[in-house]
Amino acid sequence: MSWSSLTGQTKAAVIFAILGFVVSFSTTNTSSINGVYSCSYMNFGALIFGVLALIAGGIGLAGARDLSDTKGLNMGLCAVALLIGALHIGRGLGMVGGPCG
């Protein structure tokens, strides 16, 4: 298993999935009206890299079907990138983690 045995789509999916944990551009809005507390949170870094990881992972998963030697490795990493991309989208929309939870 080496970096050179991965397809370009798989490499992109892995990089986008990792960057979703590293890059953060977030906004938090809180308010209280008549004792009713409201909070909204968005992390645009996680959202953008989550979508990119989903796209690259999906394309990589479809392209890895035609490989012979490294099919399992590429498909596995793309599937993990898809799951992490979905997690990042949830984080980006404030549904997973975040200060409003």
Image (tube, rainbow, N blue to C red):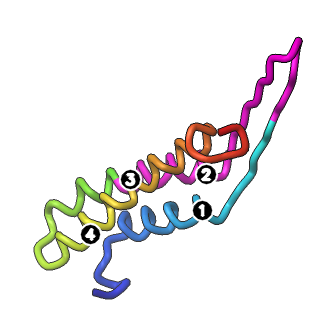
Task: Tell me whether the residue at label 4 lies in contact with that at label 1, contact meaning CB atoms closer than 8 angstroms.
Answer: no
N-terminal of the two: label 2 or label 3? 2
Residue indicated by mark 3: 83
Task: Tell me whether the residue at label 1 lies in contact with that at label 2, contact meaning CB atoms closer than 8 angstroms.
Answer: yes
- What residue do we see at 57% from left, 37% from top? 95
- Structural crowding at the residue carrying mark 2, measured as other residues with C-alpha within 10 Å and reported as few (<14), some (14–19) or many (≥20): many
* Quarter that holds the N terminus: bottom left
Residue lying farthest left? 68
Element type at mark 4: helix
- In the image, taking residue 59 as reference, residue 87 lies left or right, namely right
- What residue do we see at 79% from left, 39% from top? 28
Residue 83's place in the image compared with 64, above or below, is above
Q: Which residues are magenta?
A: 29-57
N-terminal of the two: label 1 or label 2? 1
Q: Position of residue 35 (x, y in %)?
A: 86, 17
- Give the distance between the C-alpha atoms of the residues marked 2 and 3, in whole angstroms: 13 Å
- Give the distance between the C-alpha atoms of the residues marked 3 and 4, in whole angstroms: 14 Å
- Give the distance between the C-alpha atoms of the residues marked 4 and 2, in whole angstroms: 23 Å
Residue indicated by mark 1: 21
Say what amino acid the circle numbered 1 marks.
Answer: Phe
Residue indicated by mark 4: 74
- Structural crowding at the residue carrying mark 4, measured as other residues with C-alpha within 10 Å and reported as few (<14), some (14–19) or many (≥20): many
- In the image, taking residue 83 as reference, residue 30 lies left or right, namely right
Between circles 4 and 2, the one closer to the viewer is 2
Disc assigned to residue 46: 2
- In the image, taking residue 82 as reference, residue 37 lies left or right, namely right
Q: Nearer the viewer, residue 95 or 75?
A: 95
Q: Position of residue 67 (x, y in %)?
A: 15, 69
Say what amino acid the circle numbered 3 marks.
Answer: Leu
Q: Position of residue 51 (x, y in %)?
A: 50, 46
Say what amino acid the circle numbered 2 marks.
Answer: Ala
